[in-house]
Image (cartoon, rainbow, N blue to C red):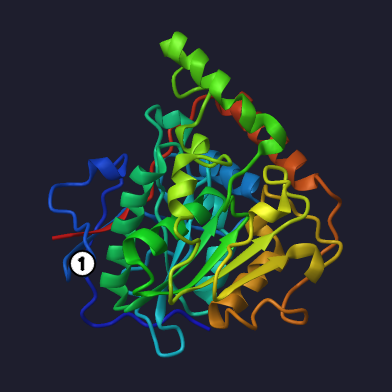
Amino acid sequence: MAPPAAAADSAPVENDPSARSAGDLPAGVATGRGAGSGKVLSNGVAAPAQPSGPDALAYLRHGDPGRALVPAGVNDPACRVTADRPSAVIVVHGTGGSVYTDYSALATALVDDGWCVFGADLGLADDPADGFGHQPLEESLRELDRLINAATTTSGADTVSLVGYSQGAVLARMWVNTIDRGATTDTVVLLASPTRGATLWGLAGLLPLAKAIEHVYPPLRGKLVNPALVELVPGSPLLARVNSPGETVPGPAYVTIQSRYDEYIPDQATQPVHGPKTRSLVITDLCPRETIGHIDMTYSPTVIDATRYLLRNWSMGGLRGQIRCVDRFPGTAAAHSAIVVNLLKLRYGRFIPTPVIYATVI
């Protein structure tokens, strides 16, 4: 289905590719719900879908360097919701990822399905070369709220659905449970969600030692320990707040999609969200030989198709017969990612990304 046609009264767009982070937005940026009409500050440059996250990163670094890339059709201020697609869809990237590197394929598929899709790069590190998803989650949450305000303002949506991947799954649920409180949320699709924390195969236990080293040697601060990752380990104060008094709020539907081959969250019991109107899908239950893990999960055809159907019907979407199944040898996505990412570092060295911004300006 083609994206909805532009309305005659579409909001003006102020392209500002020089803005380096959400903190660089001019005074008067709308941060509350229902801010009304205004200019749209949008610096996204449409880029093609890629077959994997490393391919998207390679395109970002040398195919179109220095620009804030978004999947084609994402952050279109002329997109209007329709009766068939009444919610604005918000995609939330993971730690170290971006709207483009995590969603170049999945977001494009959602746009092709007729949804108005929006995303922003959240949590830019103090050293921009360290990328996104680096700041404490409360800071990224404020940026996410600003994005959602702009998305609903320009699209005319009264409701939103969110798709969150990894860290983005926690951020999505934080927004739904603590800011929106379920008032305007339809469906939340959580991919590889560290709902009750990611153990990283025991490496999470080394974080206190790494933080102590950073404290003793200040030049290493923020280099050994990503501040956001500290909040995503089991027992963190942030996860305790997000999951209390319950992991859901009345109204929205919550669906998790997880892998038995997850490299970062091997304990399967920590991912499903508990509460009313919840579902949990395990990829190999749908496609036994699709062994995608945490890395590149958003590029799995199975996950892409399941997400498409879940946004239409959370209780019946993502069933066999609706989705594509592929054969994948375990660990291939992680190996491909490690090789490509390190080759890019060796070839191009230090890379300063330009954050994707979408915000209304009063």
In the image, taking residue 250 as reference, residue 29 lies left or right, namely: left
In the image, taking residue 159 as reference, residue 15 lies left or right, namely: left
Residue at the (53%, 65%) spot, across then down: 107
Query: Where residue 275 appears, x then y in whole percent?
Result: 55, 69
Residue at the (49%, 47%) spot, across then down: 239
In the image, taking residue 272 as reference, residue 214 lies left or right, namely: left
- Circle 1 sits on which residue? 12
Quadrant holding the C terminus: bottom left
Q: Is residue 259 above or below residue 133?
A: below
In the image, taking residue 290 as reference, residue 192 lies left or right, namely: left
Residue at the (44%, 44%) spot, across then down: 238
Instruction: Say what amino acid the circle numbered 1 marks.
Output: Pro
Identity of the residue furthest to the bottom in this view: 83
Q: Is residue 94 above or below residue 231?
A: below
Q: Secondary structure at mark 1?
A: loop
Who is closer to the viewer here, 192 or 70? Answer: 192
